[in-house]
Image (cartoon, coloured by chain):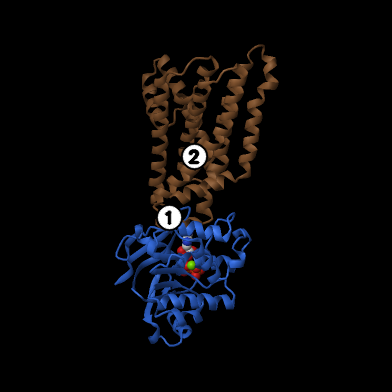
Chain colours: A brown, B blue
């Protein structure tokens, strides 16, 4: 399994798309240097907002452009025949692909994250622990999306897989708000149905510390612990389901 | 001892709009230890399908499979060497990197020396550091043979091992396989190249339209081409 992990990591990290995405990510983080002065004293908030948003956005791009293909190529070009007839279970294969992709995301987000944290620390003149935690939160959000994209890749082609991932992502963002709205207008039945969906779709808001960071509030420890364990469990379940689907698949 | 055993295997491919292709219609075959068995038959007869089922790449609709008396999806795969029809490798890696990667999955401590030895044996040593995307069809086939035999498996399952090779390559690979047979390895292979059947195989199984139509020792067949024409007519 180690070999599969390394290989999918290597394949992803060598992809040229990655460099382009990284370059744009770095540019975005520093873009507040240009727009900042227009915001009358809000430079730091703006830099935090844009910077954190960029790490998430560009991570998502990597998942959609590269992540989608790591499994598809293997199945489409039949390179998996030589791998899956060796002593490795299909489940290990899927897990290996997921971990390889996760490592790619981890490395790229950490690169962007360190640039972001250093930049913010320079702007504020102090080391920003909250920024660090917020970056970790973003990495966990991306981890959940890695799980979803791997799941999608077991039964969809890259194009549909990307659509699926984007759909799940947007739906996941909308549900918590929709539940609040439904409760507010006393549509309790709808709220109940929505809360079932809330279990299925990823709720990235648990890991979204952007507002706390922007308004200089510390992130409560419970939120961190809950968010991180939620993300880990959710990603594991996604990979587990992907493995179960893949287990029975004709290759 | 039975190394490969298929009992009443059926397989139907489902294509879109409810269309179906019955690729295997109840196949029963056994390969014993130390045997070399050839699977021959026209295009679309079901050879590749049967081989993929033996390896667990496809799930049969019904029937039973066992390899070394066990489920194909078990650790027993260490002892199997498989060459797919038209093997494919990671195009961005070199031949040597591909072989190393695949072999490490079976034997994590494989010495590099063994990899190079194998590349020399299949005649790829000179091209070992070139990415596979630049390999010719025959070179890919040679790499395919190398990955199938490098871990010294007891059972070889080869889907058209000699296709895509030039005459000399065919002779070389055939003699590698003959050597393995002499060492007591079991070989199950499909082929279209009839002159290659008799030097290697002890037994010939003929498959047509998803059914086994003949299963005879080579000694009882005589001229294999006549045999095939007679059966398939
Ligand atoms: N993935 C697939 N989807 C649908 N039909 C398939 C698929 N693979 C094979 N078939 C069909 O199943 C039948 C058996 O195919 P198979 O590849 O097993 O034949 P074969 O004996 O290996 O032929 P060849 O000598 O050309 O390699 C054929 O009719 C083929 O069209
Ligand atoms: Mg075939």
Towards the viewer: B114 or B227: B114
Please name the residue shown 52% across and 34% down the image: A166
Q: Chain for mark 1?
A: A
Q: Quadrant of residue B129?
A: bottom right
- Judge depth for marks 1 and 2 and give the one in front: 2
Q: Disc 2 marks which residue?
A: A102
Quarter of the figure with the N terminus of chain B:
bottom left
Residue A106 percent coordinates (x, y): 51, 36
Residue A3 percent coordinates (x, y): 47, 51
Residue A60 in the figure: left or right of residue B68: right
Please name the residue shown 46% across and 19% down the image: A219
Please name the residue shown 39% across and 80% down the image: B202
Q: Is residue B233 visible?
A: no
Residue B27 percent coordinates (x, y): 35, 68
Towards the viewer: B177 or B85: B177
Q: Is residue A38 above or below residue B188?
A: above
Q: Disc 1 marks which residue?
A: A250
Residues flagged by tags 1 and 2 on a common chain: yes
Residue A41's label in the rendered image is none
Q: Quadrant of residue B207?
A: bottom left
């Amino acid at each position: 399994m180690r070999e599969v992990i390394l290989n999918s990591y290597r394949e992803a990290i060598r992809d040229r798309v990655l460099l382009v995405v990284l370059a744009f990510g770095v540019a975005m983080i520093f873009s507040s240097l240009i727009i900042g002065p227009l915001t009358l004293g809000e430079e730091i908030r703006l830099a935090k907002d844009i910077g954190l948003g960029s790490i998430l956005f560009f991570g998502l791009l990597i998942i959609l452009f590269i992540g989608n293909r790591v499994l598809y190529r293997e199945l489409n070009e039949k390179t998996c025949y030589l791998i899956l007839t060796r002593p490795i279970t299909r489940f290990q294969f899927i897990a290996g692909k997921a971990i390889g992709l996760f490592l790619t995301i981890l490395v790229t987000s950490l690169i962007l994250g360190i640039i972001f944290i250093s930049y913010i620390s320079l702007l504020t003149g102090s080391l920003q622990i909250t920024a660090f935690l917020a970056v970790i939160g973003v990495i966990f959000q991306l981890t959940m999306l890695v799980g979803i994209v791997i799941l999608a890749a077991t039964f969809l082609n890259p194009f549909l897989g990307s659509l699926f991932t984007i759909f799940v992502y947007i739906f996941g963002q909308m549900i918590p708000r929709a539940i609040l709205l439904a409760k507010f207008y006393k549509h309790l039945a709808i709220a109940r149905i929505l809360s079932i969906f809330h279990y299925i779709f990823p709720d990235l808001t648990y890991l979204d510390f952007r507002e706390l960071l922007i308004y200089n509030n510390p992130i409560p420890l419970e939120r961190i612990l809950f968010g991180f364990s939620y993300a880990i469990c959710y990603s594991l379940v996604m990979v587990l389901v992907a493995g179960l689907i893949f287990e029975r698949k004709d290759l | 001892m039975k190394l490969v055993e298929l009992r009443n295997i059926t397989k139907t491919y489902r294509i879109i709009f409810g269309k179906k292709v019955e690729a295997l219609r109840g196949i029963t075959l056994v390969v014993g230890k130390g045997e070399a068995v050839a699977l021959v038959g026209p295009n679309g007869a079901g050879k590749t399908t049967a081989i993929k089922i033996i390896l667990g790449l496809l799930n049969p609709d019904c029937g039973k499979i066992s390899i070394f008396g066990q489920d194909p999806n078990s650790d027993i795969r260490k002892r199997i060497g498989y060459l797919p029809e038209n093997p494919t490798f990671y195009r961005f890696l070199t031949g040597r990197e591909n072989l190393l990667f695949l072999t490490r999955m079976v034997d994590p401590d494989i010495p590099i020396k063994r990899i190079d030895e194998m590349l020399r044996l299949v005649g790829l040593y000179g091209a070992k550091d070139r990415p596979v995307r630049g390999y010719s069809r025959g070179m890919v086939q040679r790499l395919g043979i190398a990955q199938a035999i490098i871990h010294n498996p007891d059972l070889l399952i080869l889907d058209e091992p000699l296709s895509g090779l030039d005459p000399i390559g065919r002779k070389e690979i055939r003699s590698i396989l003959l050597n393995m047979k002499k060492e007591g390895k079991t070989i199950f292979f499909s082929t279209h190249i009839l002159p290659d059947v008799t030097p290697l195989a002890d037994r010939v199984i003929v498959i047509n339209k998803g059914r086994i139509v003949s299963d005879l020792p080579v000694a009882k067949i005589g001229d294999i081409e006549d045999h095939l024409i007679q059966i398939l007519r």
